Image (spheres, grey):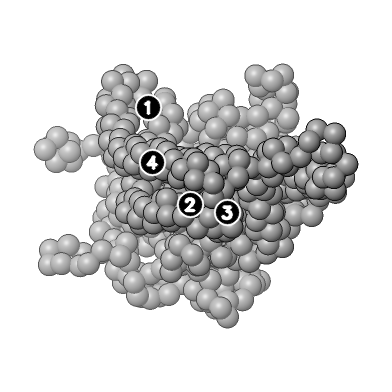
């Protein structure tokens, strides 16, 4: 039965939509409207539980009244219908409603609704632009995605329960007390007025402090994850103490925000405790006075006292719930800073799939400067780039660091929008096609090769998800990776292609990572190939071994290759020299050497041809 209930909500079944960005309630409604029947059921169960709980003091008073007004031998004969009814409520109705409420929360709401929110938030965030992730801690983004789901769920469930208890207990208490004697109602009326005043004062302040605590917690998580992700750098430079200071600052900020929140909670709880004590004493005193005056019965006194006690217990529970509710709302508000964000660089509504038949690439009047405002004395990263790469042509990009080589490739992949100009592939402006279809047609090996913390097979198959194991192994052989892969074994005893490579591929050497990345590109078999220092991590022997495979991979494809080691790209069809964001030279290796310009100087430096003049310039 429980499995059938659990199957009513599949967290990943719905097609996600980007969350709204205009406020907290629309963000909540984005998810509530998808599970309306669950929310309605929670609301109904919460109301039933509150109403059944409030019957207990009434039953106690009724039983005491019956006992005090009947002789023992007449009690059961004359009152059994009332006693059986009360017993059925306590033994059957109340447990059944509680069971329904607990089952709804534990089997559907807690596991499924939380993960539905996580899934949809992740779906949106992972489609954000590359810049979005560059501008924040990965750990902080992940923490917000993971925590927002449970916090939204908890705040919703607790808010329903708290609202019902306040409404049902307040109205029921007034009705029950007024039915006994209206003189018993002033304490409870004054208590509710005071309670409303406390909530009015403390709730907004708790919300702001809770948001600040959640923000500081996300920042702390981001810093800790940043240290762990770069642990090799931390150890190589012996900077553990500096990382301590980096994390200590975040812990101190979190502690300060947490203390601000708990000070407010302490004041809230102390004031509520004083009000609760006054309610119990005043109500009990009035009840005893009324009984002593003969206006109410013993049964009424027996009802009033536990009712007052139960209201104070309810108030304490609601106080704790309100604290938790606003802690969770603060977490949701913090999460919205990464989740409820307009998608940067979305595909235009009319975007179509890119179709590559020839592989011609054109850069026309390209200007780009990472969105910075230009000012006199500083030019852009790229300005005025006009370049045509013919179908099947192999072009090398050459130039000093910062010349704009990688930026040009990133624009081709549409990681950024150019400030001016456009890029065409087979006559199609890449700004008008879907980004996924664009990147499907381009295979790239980067200098900083990162692998997923998965098996070797999974990493290579990333280039073609439907590839068979035989295709994966053939790609690995062509990348000269098959032999070392067979000898791998991870910490769980998985061997060969099943071995996991660790986070970012840390279990492999740089050369091994690069060969796995090459295998992935070989398997992808895209018509456009981008090589950004593709063999920089390989030793000369391995590079020579796979060079023929690279030549075969480049055949029939349009190739853009970036390399600081000029010997690796000297054989390409054409070399384009970038300098200060402009095309300085263009031609074959021999043509550029004959021009004796920027390329020739770079070549002579790398080939050992330092002249005294160049050496003096370098020394300066």
Q: In the rendered view, does 375 fall on the left or right side of 385?
A: left
Mark 3: few/some/many CA within 10 Å (<14, 14-19, 20+): some
Q: Where residue 180 is drawn, which disc sits there?
A: 3
In three-dimensional space, the C-alpha distance between marks 4 and 2, rounded to whole angstroms, equals 14 Å
Q: Are marks 1 and 2 in contact (CB under 8 Å)?
A: no
In three-dimensional space, the C-alpha distance between marks 3 and 1, rounded to whole angstroms, equals 75 Å
Mark 2 element type: helix
In three-dimensional space, the C-alpha distance between marks 4 and 3, rounded to whole angstroms, equals 21 Å
In three-dimensional space, the C-alpha distance between marks 1 and 2, rounded to whole angstroms, equals 72 Å
User: Which numbered disc, 4 or 1, marks the residue closer to the eye?
Assistant: 4
Q: Residue at x 53, y 71 (%)?
A: 347
User: Which numbered disc, 4 or 3, marks the residue closer to the eye?
Assistant: 3
In three-dimensional space, the C-alpha distance between marks 4 and 1, rounded to whole angstroms, equals 62 Å
Q: Residue at x 75, y 54 (%)?
A: 9
Q: Nearer the viewer, residue 190 or 422?
A: 190
Q: Position of residue 72 (x, y in %)?
A: 80, 33
Q: Nearer the viewer, residue 32 or 588?
A: 32
**First along the sequence among labels 4 and 2:** 2
Q: Mark 1 highlights which residue? A: 233
Residue 266 versus residue 157 in the image, above or below: above
User: Which numbered disc, 1 or 2, marks the residue closer to the eye?
Assistant: 2
User: Which numbered disc, 4 or 2, marks the residue closer to the eye?
Assistant: 2
**First along the sequence among labels 4 and 1:** 1
**First along the sequence among labels 3 and 1:** 3
In three-dimensional space, the C-alpha distance between marks 2 and 3, rounded to whole angstroms, equals 8 Å
**First along the sequence among labels 1 and 2:** 2
Residue 402 versus residue 139 in the image, above or below: below
- Quick one: which residue is furthest to the bottom in this view? 350
Q: Where residue 184 is drawn, which disc sits there?
A: 2
Q: Mark 4 highlights which residue? A: 278
Q: Quadrant of residue 587?
A: bottom left
């Amino acid at each position: 039965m429980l499995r059938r209930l659990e199957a009513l909500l599949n967290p990943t079944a719905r097609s996600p939509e980007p969350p709204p960005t205009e406020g907290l309630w629309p963000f909540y409604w984005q998810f509530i409207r998808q599970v309306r029947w669950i929310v309605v059921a929670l609301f109904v169960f919460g109301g039933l539980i509150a109403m059944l709980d409030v019957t207990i003091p009434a039953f106690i008073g009724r039983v005491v009244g019956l006992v005090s007004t009947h002789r023992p031998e007449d009690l059961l004969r004359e009152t059994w219908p009332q006693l059986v009814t009360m017993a059925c409520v306590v033994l059957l109705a109340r447990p059944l409603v509680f069971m329904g409420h607990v089952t709804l929360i534990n089997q559907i709401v807690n596991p499924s609704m939380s993960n539905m929110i996580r899934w949809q938030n992740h779906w949106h965030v992972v489609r954000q632009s590359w810049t979005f992730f560059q501008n924040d801690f990965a750990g902080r983004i992940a923490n917000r995605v993971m925590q927002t789901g449970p916090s939204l769920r908890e705040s919703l469930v607790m808010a329903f329960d708290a609202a019902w208890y306040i409404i049902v207990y307040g109205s029921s208490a007034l009705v029950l007390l007024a039915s006994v004697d209206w003189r018993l109602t002033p304490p409870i009326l004054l208590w509710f007025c005071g309670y409303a005043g406390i909530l009015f004062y403390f709730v907004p302040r708790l919300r702001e402090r809770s948001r600040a605590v959640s923000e500081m917690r996300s920042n702390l998580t981001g810093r800790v994850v940043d240290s762990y992700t770069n642990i090799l750098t931390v150890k190589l430079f012996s900077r553990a103490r500096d990382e301590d200071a980096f994390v200590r600052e975040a812990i101190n900020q979190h502690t300060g925000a947490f203390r601000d929140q708990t000070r407010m909670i302490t004041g809230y709880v102390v004031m509520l405790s004083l009000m609760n004590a006054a309610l119990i004493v005043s109500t009990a005193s009035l009840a005893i006075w009324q009984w002593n005056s003969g206006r109410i019965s013993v049964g009424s006194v027996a009802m009033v006292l536990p009712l007052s006690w139960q209201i104070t217990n309810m108030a304490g529970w609601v106080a704790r719930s309100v604290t938790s509710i606003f802690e969770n709302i603060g977490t949701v508000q913090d999460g919205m800073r990464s989740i409820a964000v307009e998608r940067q660089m979305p595909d235009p509504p009319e975007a179509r799939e890119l179709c590559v038949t020839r592989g011609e690439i054109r850069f026309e009047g390209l200007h780009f400067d990472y969105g910075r405002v230009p000012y006199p004395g500083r030019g852009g990263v790229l300005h005025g780039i006009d370049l045509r790469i013919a179908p099947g042509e192999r072009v090398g990009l050459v130039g000093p660091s910062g010349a704009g080589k990688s930026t040009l490739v990133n624009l081709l992949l549409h990681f950024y929008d150019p400030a001016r100009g456009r890029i065409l592939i087979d006559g199609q402006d890449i700004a008008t096609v879907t980004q996924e279809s664009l990147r499907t047609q381009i295979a790239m090996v980067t200098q900083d090769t990162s692998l997923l913390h998965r098996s070797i097979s999974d990493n290579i198959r990333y280039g073609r998800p439907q590839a068979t194991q035989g295709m994966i192994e053939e790609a690995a052989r062509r990348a000269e990776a098959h032999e070392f892969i067979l000898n791998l074994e991870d910490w769980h005893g998985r061997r060969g292609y099943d071995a996991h490579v660790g986070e970012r591929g840390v279990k492999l050497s740089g050369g091994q990572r690069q060969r796995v990345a090459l295998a992935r590109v070989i398997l992808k078999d895209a018509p456009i190939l981008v090589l950004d220092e593709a063999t920089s991590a390989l030793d000369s022997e391995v590079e020579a071994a796979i060079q023929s495979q690279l030549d075969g991979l480049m055949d029939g494809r349009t190739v853009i290759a970036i390399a600081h080691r000029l010997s690796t790209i000297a054989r390409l069809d054409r070399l384009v020299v970038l300098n200060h964001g402009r095309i300085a030279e263009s031609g074959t290796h021999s043509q550029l050497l004959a021009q004796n310009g920027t390329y020739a100087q770079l070549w002579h430096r790398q080939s050992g041809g330092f002249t005294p003049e160049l050496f003096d310039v370098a020394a300066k």
